[in-house]
Amino acid sequence: MKRREPLTNTQLLMTIAIGIFFAMYLAAMVSLKGGFLRFQQIFDLLNDNAYLIIIACALTIVMIGGGINISVGGVIGLTVMACALALNDLQNQSGALGTMEAIGLALGIGLAFGVGQGFLISYLEIQPFIVTLAGMFLSRGLTTILSVNPVKVAHEGFLVVTKTKILLPHLGYIAQNGNQIPGKLEVGAVIALVVVAVLYLMLRFIRLGRNIYAIGGNQQSALMLGINVKRTRFLSYVISGLLSGLAGFVFLMHKPAGNASVAMRSEMDAIAASIIGGTLLTGGVGNVIGTFFGTMILATIQKIIALSPLNESWWQDMASGAMLGFFILLQSVVLSSRENRRARRKDMLKPQKE
Amino acid sequence: MSKKQKNGSRTGSPGQLMIPLVALGILILFNLFRDPSFFAIGIAVNNSGNSVLSGNLISIIDSASALAIISMGMTLVTAACGGQDISVGAVGAIAGSFFVKVLNRGSSITIGSVILGIIVCCLGTILFMLFNGTLVSVFRIQPMIATLILFSCGRSIAYWINGSATPQLISPIISAMGMTIPGIPIPTPIFAVILMGVLLYLVFKFTNLRLYTQSVGINEGAARLNGVNPVMIKLLSFVLLGVCVSVAAVIGVCRLGQLNHKTLLIDIEMDAILAVAIGGNNLGGGKFRIIGSVLGAYIIQMLTTTLYAMNVAPVNVKAYKAIVIIIIVVAGSPVIKAKISSLITRLKSRNESVAEKEVA
């Protein structure tokens, strides 16, 4: 009989996250019923958290490479504000055209932040936390310089795009008056799912993806294997910046209005989602599929609390804090017990002296 | 943090203070050229009729007090654990609510009840910090991740302890602690900074804590083999951070005379980490100088006050702050430092060769 390969740490942590997500969702279906029995609930979770899924993936890539990027929330805020203003300007000039310009602007802002931060971190060897903290300050400050007041998008062509929904008739439900209501999925959610799939394939099969794991796992060995450590780290930050810009555009599609406090503190949610999904801040371990389920776990907790009688913001914070603590402890215990077992096995395999 | 960074600038030597001192000097020079009256110190009469020192310098030193105190503790945690505590703002809100809870229990606020309040506040905060410390030291979780828990739910716990939105504290004792004591023209929070600084100085003077902390930060395994208990040292650094946070929280509460669990010490964790980094300390742990972090805190506050004096709107300050921070860290980055030092040696050798030729 062929002996099965043991799970790697990445796979183990991801499996735990997926298992807990399904257990939690089942518990919600049994105890809360209502919306949780419909597919639409999952679609709503995806629609509302599409931007969070994308920035959590952006963070996962950087964290696998052993870094951190806390500017993602700020870049979303800046992108949303800049795109909203640009769309309103275009409205007066050229009419329906403009959505493509907004996408270009969003990706451009993200790329600029990614390239700048990546250069400072990888080529000038400045600590990533400080550089991206400065990036966060810069993006939040630029947002308020653009406009202190909320800006609502009035561009009709763009509003049509935001209202476009993908209908899935088989996954809908039958309303009380007998009408068949199809499941509705927003374009942003589809973009988020595509991003997760592309990044999964990239991290698994493309050389750049494998190199990111290598530099996160052990920078010195990666260097000795002939990997261009600096360029790999630089590219990981560029990808992360681009994804934050894209997340900003997705956010604007979900809520077409710019505001100085858009996506405030979402970077911490994204970090939490990555950790719950099994990414380690030390680098070398992680997976975007796990991150996706990590985001869904956070979103489901919030939904459950919103529907339960404990619907107060401080209860929500405490519950997500407790959940995060549980996952962090679980990971630590699981990983250390595995290490101990492996060490013991090595001891047993050692030839006995005497 | 990567191993390479750890091996990098591990200098606890006076050279470490170069970056903060140069940054401070440039800020002072800039202000001198811009408007010399920036440094004017006058005497004004405040609302309660005391004559107090006034002026930009005093307000910088005064309003940076909480940040300076927290950055002292943050330096220790950074040095011992090689990571930062991002929950200090939220734990500060918890500390403030302990303080307010004790003071509002009695009928009136006396000096005795204030002292009791500070003690309870310290003990409660230390308890929460021990939670962080246990996760970091016993369970070996990255400090930033471990403190993310209290970061996300700390302010809710603060609300839960008090059970109301903004409890008030109205008493001359509180305003004396937050602003100035009648008859003394210097704001009281400045004395708190000096007190904490002297306390930490005495601790380092009469114990081996500095050596132990640095050895744990540089190589935990080696420290353990040499008889230092890394778990205890890390816990101790979190306990000291807890004391710092509770003092800062008391200052924050007394300054306003009320507790707002949503805004007390808001975003101070980011500024404190920044102060540690500007102070030339390695965020990957190891050798440290607390005076550098304190200087960093004053630099941050001076930068903010300068921007205000230049009529930059408060909401836009962050963008300019970010640009200055990037300039400071780029100037202090290992690559730039190495380039400059190699340039200097090359210039020197060229001068020497020129001198030799002239002699010949």
Image (cartoon, helix red, strand yellow):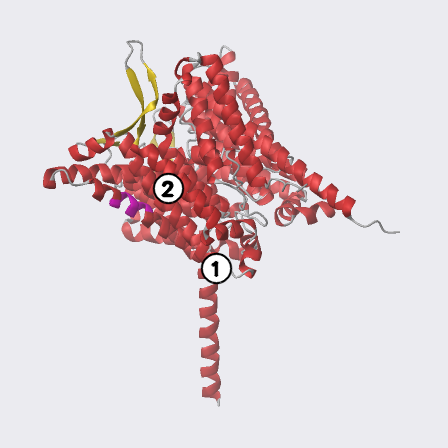
Number of residues whose C-alpha sits closer than 10 Å to that of mark 1, classed few (under 14), some (14–19) or many (20 or more): few
Given the image, on which type of amino acid does mark 2 rest?
Met
Number of residues whose C-alpha sits closer than 10 Å to that of mark 2, classed few (under 14), some (14–19) or many (20 or more): many
The location of residue B335, given as percent across then percent down, is: 46, 60
Asked if the stretch drawn in magenta spans residue A105, the answer is yes
Element assignment for label 2: helix
Q: Is residue A336 left or right of residue A105?
A: right
* Mark 1, residue position: A228
Determine whether B28 is above or below A341 in the image: below
Of all residues, the one furthest to the bottom in this rendering is: B360
Total numbered circles: 2
* Mark 2, residue position: A136
* Discs 2 and 1 carry the same chain letter: yes
Given the image, on which type of amino acid does mark 1 rest?
Asn
The location of residue A209, given as percent across then percent down, is: 46, 50
The location of residue B93, given as percent across then percent down, is: 47, 26
Asked if the stretch drawn in magenta spans residue B355, the answer is no
The location of residue B251, given as percent across then percent down, is: 46, 29
Point out the tag, 2 or 1, that comes first from the N-terminus.
2
Q: Residue at x 68, y 47 (%)?
A: B221
Near-viewer residue (B60 or B271): B271
Q: Using the rendered image of the protein, determine whether residue A259 is visible from the camera's viewpoint.
A: no
- The main secondary structure of the magenta stretch is helix
Determine whether B143 is above or below A226 in the image: above
Query: Which portion, as a residue range, is magenta?
Result: A104-110
Near-viewer residue (B17 or B342): B342
Q: Is residue A22 left or right of residue A186?
A: right
Element assignment for label 1: loop
Q: Using the rendered image of the protein, determine whether residue B101 is visible from the camera's viewpoint.
A: yes
Q: CA distance from mark 2 to mark 1?
A: 28 Å
Letter of the chain that mark 1 sits on in the rendering: A
Letter of the chain that mark 2 sits on in the rendering: A
